Amino acid sequence: MIKIENLKKSFRTEEVETLALNSVNLKVEGGEFVAIMGPSGCGKSTLLNIIGMLDNPNEGYYYFNDQEVGGLKENQRTKIRKGNLGFVFQSFNLIDELTVFENVELPLIYLNMKKSEREQKVKKVLERMKIAHREKHFPQQLSGGQQQRVAIARAVVTNAKLILADEPTGNLDSKNGIEVMNLLTELNQEGTTIVMVTHSDRDSHYAHRVINLFDGQIVTESQNKPFEVNA
Amino acid sequence: MFKNHLKIAWRNLKKRKVFASINILGLSLGFSCAILIFLFVNHHLQFDNFHNNSDRIYRVVTEEHRDEVGYDAAVPPGFAKGFKTDYDYAEKVAKIFTREGWQINGTGNKTSQRFQENVAFTEPVFFEILNFPLLEQLGDQTLDQPNTAYITERFSKKMFGDENPLGKTVVVRNKETIQIIGVLKDLPENTVIQGDIFLSYETLKHYDRFVYSESWGGINSSLMCFALLHPNQNIAEIEKNLIQLVDKHRPTSKNVHRYKLQSLDDIHFDNKYGGVNVSLLWIFTLIGFFIITIACINFINISAAQAFTRSKEIGIRKVLGSFKQHLFWQFISETFIISLFALIFSLIIVIAVLPSFNGLFTLNLSVISLLDVKVIGFVLGLLIFVSLFAGSYPGILLARILPTLALKGKLTQKDTGGKMTRKVLVTVQFAISIVLIVATVTIGKQISYAINADLGFDKDAIVMVDIPENIERIKLNGLLERIGKISGVKNTSACLTSPGGTDSNWITGIRYNNKAEYEEFSISAKLADENYINTFNLELIAGRNFYVRDSITEVVVNEMVAQKLGLASSEELIGKHIELNGGDIKASIVGVIANFHDQNFHEGISPVFIAPQSNAFNEIAIKIDSQNADAALTGIEQRWKEVFSKYIYEFNFLDERVARQYEEEQRFLSMSKLFSGLAIFISCLGLYGLISFFVAQRRKEIGIRKVLGGKVGDILLLFTQDFLKLIFIAGIVATPLAWYAMNNWLQNYKYRVTIDWWVFVLAIGAIIAITMVTISYQAIKAATVNPIKSLRTE
């Protein structure tokens, strides 16, 4: 699904150029659950942003489903991203002015889906995330765990094939954190590919494979045993 | 999608109530001004646009080439006939002679009904050229017989109530009995022809022999000539060929006529010929545009500053698949909603202020005027324009936010951009405000100068009272004597017109000292009795006043006559013989008076003669003691009514009459005050919004500065210094613009004030003061907060 070759990304401020990613090579097969780990500033999020097509690399190639997407313009990237990719963030990133239902509905609106179809899909996913009773609430009225469940609902409502999660449990207590990881694992078991950036050793154990980044380079890669979903 | 945009927009409005209120209030005021100005301009653009064949209808006007060129919206009485018989350019030609405030009395059981009305004398063909529909007619009679008239429905109602007016009679100016033979639909507001009684041209022989005649000897400014030309005429060629009429009928006149054809569209706007000053409409339009711009700038600035606070939402939308254009249009929809709210408020404001607006600009607009297709089109266009104009820039800023930074909260104000643009826009607002203040002060100065300047004659405490035409000299003298005896009356004089403050001027040619030819220049006639000079306190600088004899043998002139004749001193005029008014007056100059402003300040001082031609007297001037004014006024009215029991008594004060000549300027001044005030207020709203935003953003910085020892003054300076710089730049930009604009405007006046440097200092100072007041409240509030509190909020 994802093939990255010799990827480089640097950021330029007024005087200093920082190399965030340096010759990164990575392959992720469909259905995999990959965790990316490493210390702060090692380039994890930059890599995730490029995989998520929110940013372009400076050099190298990025193939998504065999299509080179590294050099695409913003609107072209948006077109590919829509419906294929779902995002889950540490700080949930729900729109405060929209209700739970409306937040989850938003990606479907951008897919120009009919209203009746949207309603059906949103209701279904909210039920699955056990948050349907809160559909008319605004994000500030929910707990962190609930907000993250809404964010996951929003990521999967389009039946995205790839979910990119950026420290999804970073702002949650351990109970809610485990719940979220179980949800991601369930989704993965149903066939969704997951790439997750995390600082948490515990969370990384949910992944099939752990990639360690340091100073913009992949330093180690290890396989995990298959993980049992906690009931 | 649109629904989603609306939802977000609505919730954002609720969340950011202060900013929403500032935006809606500013835009409402902007919209209100724009709509009112549009109504005003539209009213003027609609003039005489309802006639059939309007592209072929022309009014013939006259350029009078003497030593200077004069313009008269009239033609000699003989012109219409000459134009019809000597040429074949026109299908129809009609004369119309208009008079204001003529007394109309009822007859029979309506005898007690007396009104003052605007009347016109015209020919049947006039109603075939211009479209004023006749609703009822007595048989098939038209205005071709003497002593017949059409009246409007309005006058019919006033004089006859619900009775059928056809066949009934009225008496015009206590002289002729006139039969009503037709009822016209009321003339609309938007036509240059005004009047309620249209008398047949044949009736004019009883009232004005000169205008009724086919004379080419002179022009009465109230005699207009309209023509419906054959299709496809070459106007320039017609005008060229009309010179033949001058050669034929006025071969030796020093006042060389050039007849011009003025299209129906131009009549209302050609201010050479008494039309409105079209530049005023453009200035209005420009000011409307300025005010809308200021309101939009507020919106742009506040929204752009807020782009930062909305970056998270934008980031999320982008991640979820929103294209840039979605975000752009989302913001435009939000602007649309705010503008729509503002529009609704503005319509309420417009309806509420319409009566005062009508009063200020002598209009008669109603709420129904708002339902006109053009007005609706304008309002919708304005809504769309403002949504796009005000929404585009913030929309672009929002759409280009980088989601990766926005979602990580790493976005800074710098990344959202727009700081420079904001500075430029605020500077533009300041510059507009400075220009408007300079304009208002200059217009005020000029008008006050014109009204208060020494005009060379006394205008205070002088009452001007109308008298019926052609009254016997003996009766008039009796009245003057009786009025003179009233306590509080100092002086009286019977005259054609006062020295200044009048629109109607009798201008004629002059032959000096038995020269073979008339002079190149013309002379203005002030026909009056011997008390004129004393009553108006005119200064006699040479010779003496004239004596009144049975015929006119002596005249007094002003020193401008000597100047025009190139004489070294006014004394040289004394004893010289002059011939005036085509030989009607042959007299000696016995005195010279100092120059005075016989016309308004737009014009220069003309040569003037004063001669006792009693059959031309129209009014009497009475100088009263202002301490005793009420008693004097009552006495004057009483005496007047005893002598002229059948007439309507009317008087006015000369100083008010002089001031009325500046009505257009007064209106312009009121408008400038109103709109500059509004423009400044709307700008302040925007500044208030911006400063509240900056204060909120820099709360932490203020806290740190205070902890480190910063005083309130330092923190106030932090916020004000940027704005002071912008005001300074705005001053540099606005000064030459304002100077250029006002200098141009002042060129309309022969006598004008100078634009002093202090006006600019005052304007810039005022803007600094207003800005300080606007931002100080927020800045001081922020600066006096305990730093612990501001640091904790972060």
Image (spheres, grey):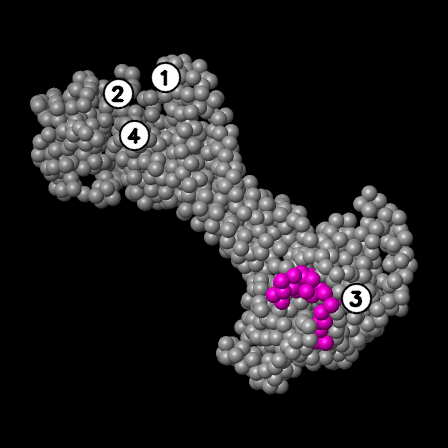
Pick the residue in front: B218 or A80: B218
- Check residue B612 in the rendering and tell me which mark sits there, or answer none: 3
Residue designated by label 2: A170
Residue B327 in view here? no
Quarter of the rendering containing residue A96: top left
Closer to viewer: mark 2 or mark 1: 1
- Check residue B704 in the rendering and tell me which mark sits there, or answer none: 1
Residue under mark 3: which chain is it in? B
Q: Residues within 10 Å of mark 2 (few under 14, many from 20)?
A: some
Q: Residues within 10 Å of mark 4 (few under 14, many from 20)?
A: some
Q: If you read the primary sequence from the N terminus, does the residue marked by circle 3 or circle 4 appear first?
A: 4
**Range drawn in magenta:** B555-583
Closer to viewer: mark 2 or mark 3: 3
B343 lies left or right of B199: left
Is disc 1 placed on a helix, strand or loop?
A: helix
Q: Are marks 2 and 3 on the same chain?
A: no
Q: Is residue B149 above or below residue B356?
A: below
* Label 1 with label 3: CB-CB less than 8 Å: no
Q: Is residue B252 above or below residue B344?
A: below
Q: Residues within 10 Å of mark 1 (few under 14, many from 20)?
A: some
Closer to viewer: mark 4 or mark 1: 1
Q: Are marks 2 and 1 on the same chain?
A: no
Q: CA distance from mark 4 to mark 2?
A: 20 Å
Quadrant of the rendering where the C terminus of chain B is positioned: top left
Is disc 3 placed on a helix, strand or loop?
A: loop
Pick the residue in front: B144 or B467: B467
Q: Is residue B427 above or below residue B408?
A: below
Q: Residues within 10 Å of mark 3 (few under 14, many from 20)?
A: many
Is disc 2 placed on a helix, strand or loop?
A: loop
- Check residue B411 in the rendering and tell me which mark sits there, or answer none: 4
